[in-house]
Each structure stands twice: as structure tokens, then as C-alpha cells.
Image (tube, coloured by chain):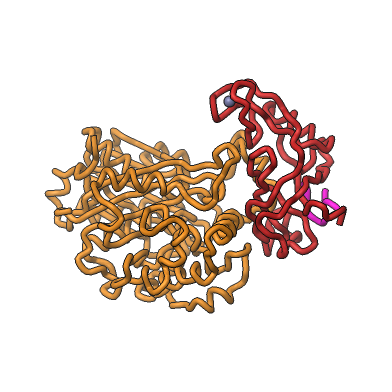
Amino acid sequence: MSIRGKAYIVGAFEHPRREIPDRSLTQIHADVALGALADAGLSLGDVDAYFCDSGAGFGPLSMAEYLGLRCSIVDSTETGGSSYLAHVGHAAAAIAAGKCQVALVTLAGKPRSSFEGFRGFQGEATPESSFEGMWGINGAVTNYALAATRHMHEFGTTSEQLATIKVAASLHAEHNPNAFLPHAVTVEEVLESPMVSDPLHRMDCCVVTDGGGAVIVASPSVARDLARPMVKVLGHGETVKHTNNGRVDLTYTGAVWSGPRAFDEAGLGPADVDYASIYDSFTITVLETLEDLGFCDKGKGGEFVMDGALVAPHGRLPFNTDGGGLCNNHPGNRGGMTKIIEAVRQLRGEAHPAVQVPNCRIALAHGTGGSIATRMGSVTLLLGQEDA
Amino acid sequence: MRSEAGLPVPAPSPTAETAEFWAATARGTLLLPRCDECSTVIWYPRVFCPACGSQTVSWIEASGRGIIYSFTVARRGMGPYKDAAPYAVAYVELEEGPRIMTNVVDDDPGSLEVGMPVQVVFHDTGEGSALYRFRRAGGGDR
Ligand SMILES: [Zn+2]
């Protein structure tokens, strides 16, 4: 059974703020839930399935009560920042199986203003923690730098090529009044920003923001009765790539498996994609993912991103037209939700006119949760207009 | 604890599954679990073979020799590493196969290179264990 055409994204909402010290985590979940429902033309009473990560209390148990939901399906699949793409895939499968009609997916986080919602290890630590937590890893950047070093070693990828990805995102962020970093930068400015963990500079890293977002996934019969442009779920693929019993290969991500699964389900290939939301925790994340999804050969990502390839509206593969995690928003240190939302905007023709891709029929959204140097949850979604 | 190289030596949290591994580090020995069924060398240390599902493993002694698979120089540290930067975090590929996360201790971490031969050293945590780190091979005790 395929989910192709069995479900639609009918509502999407990105919290407009990037620093939210005055609202609780649950309030932000509620803000984005109501925002996405209003966008769809639905209400809380229509929701019969709910998806969130483990950040808010006890996940769906806590949040279903807070929001007053009555659900026949709940899911708190936790793959880090890619969780929300997995949630959309799982929601579409549940809808296709007749388990529910209207699924709400929410994300909220406050890493900028507080640690509220951040949960450290509970109970026994993860089994790998004593073998990875002792070496001075500084959050994610040290890990991603290990991948960047190896990619450069094997393929000759350069810091200038990585910087070009940041520059493309910044050219898009200029048109987003809500972007955390709304100004264009140059390759030279990226390279002159302080080195954080060689070879990654500060500007190779995503922003740290409060905020969140939500989407509504609904059955075809519900979607047809709503006023908004229909965004069809065409395909979904997910996987966990890990250190493979100590035989880790840092030059590729889980997208090598999630991508083909999503393309197969959709009956599409990389050449069919008009717009791509590519997870951009760091510039190297984008570069490896572009290769792994088949937009270019392995090792050729550095060449691919040059010459404005990622710049909307006329590049070969316009990406992250909201400014992405590198410039716009990475709410809760999790960039997956905003990847879906910008893909929905593009397919509806509602991106900023300066970055709207003409005749955008097919969009891809990809999430990479966890770390590309250890273990990651990789999820690929293919979305399309109603006739796609 | 701090090592002679100035790096902090945070203590790990041994479990019933990893106590033997960590006790050996205190004696200056790097053990690797090897599957009794399929002979796969396992990393990270566990009493389970992810290659075949066996729960019987034997501990073998690693040579301590390897090469740098990848590395990064952290320009600032957090927690116990707050004042330790710059320092190198690396994946070292052991002769026995596994690529393991560690530090490469060096006076000039920026001059390290992928592929460089390295040799294990141990830094005592003071809690019945030691951290396995690496130095350039043949570089003496500098
Ligand atoms: Zn085995």
C-alpha cells in the first residue's frame, strides 16, 4: 500500500517570533496549533490524531489534555529535528488506513530564552554516552565538523563551497521580515566569521531560536471541502543511520535510504523536484544531503552549489526560500517543521514573490535529526500540487 | 582530574555491561569486545553483537595503534572543557577495524592530518578508570 494521494497538508503555521521569554512551552504549542487550524479552516474539535515530540511534558499524553483533544491516533516518534517529517508520513499512513481524518502535528521550543522544554537524560544514560560524552563535544557543531573534515579529505570540498550555501540562504532571508538574520552575507564574511570547530565557522551554523510551527494533515474528503490550495502527500521515506558497529562513514547521511523510498512511493525522481527544503543545521548537512538525495553525484556537492544553483527563483534547485535554519528559524534546535511549512508555501504559491518558484508543482522536504557524525533520523517527504 | 596535557578527565559511568572495559583502562589496557559466534569486533563496547545478535562476547586486547579517520579542533569548550580549547576531537580507526571517537592530544592540534598514525595513551580519572586518548605515533612522550 502506498500513501500517494491518500492525504493532504491542509494547514500550516510558523510562529512569527524568534525569542519568546514571556510564553510557556505549552502556550507556544497552542499558538501554533490554533494558527495551523485557522489556516486550514478547521477547529480543535475536528482533530482526531495528534503528533508531537517528547519535549512537552509526557508528549501527546500531556498535550492532548492541555489542548482538549480527543484522539484515535497519537504518535511521539522522536528522531530529533526530523521528527515532524516522520509525523507527517505516519499521519498520512494512518489516514490511508482509515484510523483518523485530521492529524495535528506541533513543534515548540525555547532554547534561546530558557531551557524550558529541554530534557536531559532521564534514568539510565544512553548506551553510547560514556564513549562519546567524554571528549569535549560542544553541542552538535563538533560532530558536524568531523563530517566536514572527512568530506573535504575524500572529495576536495572547500570552505568556500560550504559558505556558498549560507550565502544562498541569506539572500532568501532578506525577503523574510521574521527572519532571525535578515541580511545577505558574502562568502568572505562567512569565511571571516570566527572558527567554532574546524573547518566550520560561526556562519556555517544555524541560528538558535525560540518558536515553533504546526501542520494539519487530512484525508482527501476533508481536504476537498476546505478553501485552501490542496497540497498532496506524494511520498515518505525514513530511516536511522548510526555508527554501524564502529564502521561509521562520515561522507553520507541517512538520506541515501530515505530519499529513494520517498521518490519510489511518489513515482518521481530528483529531476522532477521544483523546490527543495533541505535540513540545514550546518552548511555541511545541506551539501551531503544534496548528494545523498541524488541531485548530484557523491562528492560533487561542492561543485553543485556554486553559480547560484540554490538561489530562488531561477537556480537549478531553489532551496530554503524562507532563509532556512541558517538564517530564518531553527525553533527548539529542530529544523524539520519549518522545512515542511516552506514547502507548503511554495506549492500554494504563497512564498515571498521574490523567491516564489514559478509553477512549483513538486516540492521535497528533508529532515536530518541527531548528528551526521553519529546517529541520525533521516526523513524525506515529497509533496505536490493537486494535479501532481 | 586533569591530564598532563591539560585536558580534563571526566569519569565515565560504567554499567554492568561495561565495567570490565573501564576497569581495564585503569590498568592501561584498551579492550574490545569480539563476538564468540561470528568473530566481529564490536564498538561501542557492549555485550551484544549487532552483526549477528549473539549475547556471548570475549574481550580482546587492542594493539592501541590506529590512524586518524577524521578530526576537528574545538576552538572553545563547555562544561569540564571550558578552559581546555583548543583541543582535537577525532575518530581514530583502530587496527582492529572500529572507528572510535576520542581526543588526539597534541601541542599543535591544527597540524594534525587525516590518515596520521596514532598510538593510545591513558589518562586516569581517579575513579577506577582512565580515558583512552591518542598521540601521534613515534612522537615520543611529548
Ligand atoms: Zn556476532
Residue A209 seen:
yes
Position of A267 with respect to A76 (left or right) is left
Q: Position of residue A247 (x, y in %)?
A: 58, 41
Residue A141 seen:
no
**Quadrant of the rendered image containing residue A350:** bottom left
Q: Residue at x 37, y 54 (%)?
A: A294
Report the quarter where the N terminus of chain A lies. Answer: top left
Q: Which residues are magenta?
A: B1-9
Q: Position of residue B53 (x, y in %)?
A: 54, 24
Dominant SS of magenta comes to loop
Q: Residue at x 58, y 74 (%)?
A: A193
Q: Residue at x 29, y 72 (%)?
A: A313
Displayed-image quarter of ligand 1? top right
Which color was chain A given? orange
Q: Nearer the viewer, residue B82 or B61?
A: B61
Which color was chain B given? red
- Give above or below for A90 relative to A150: above
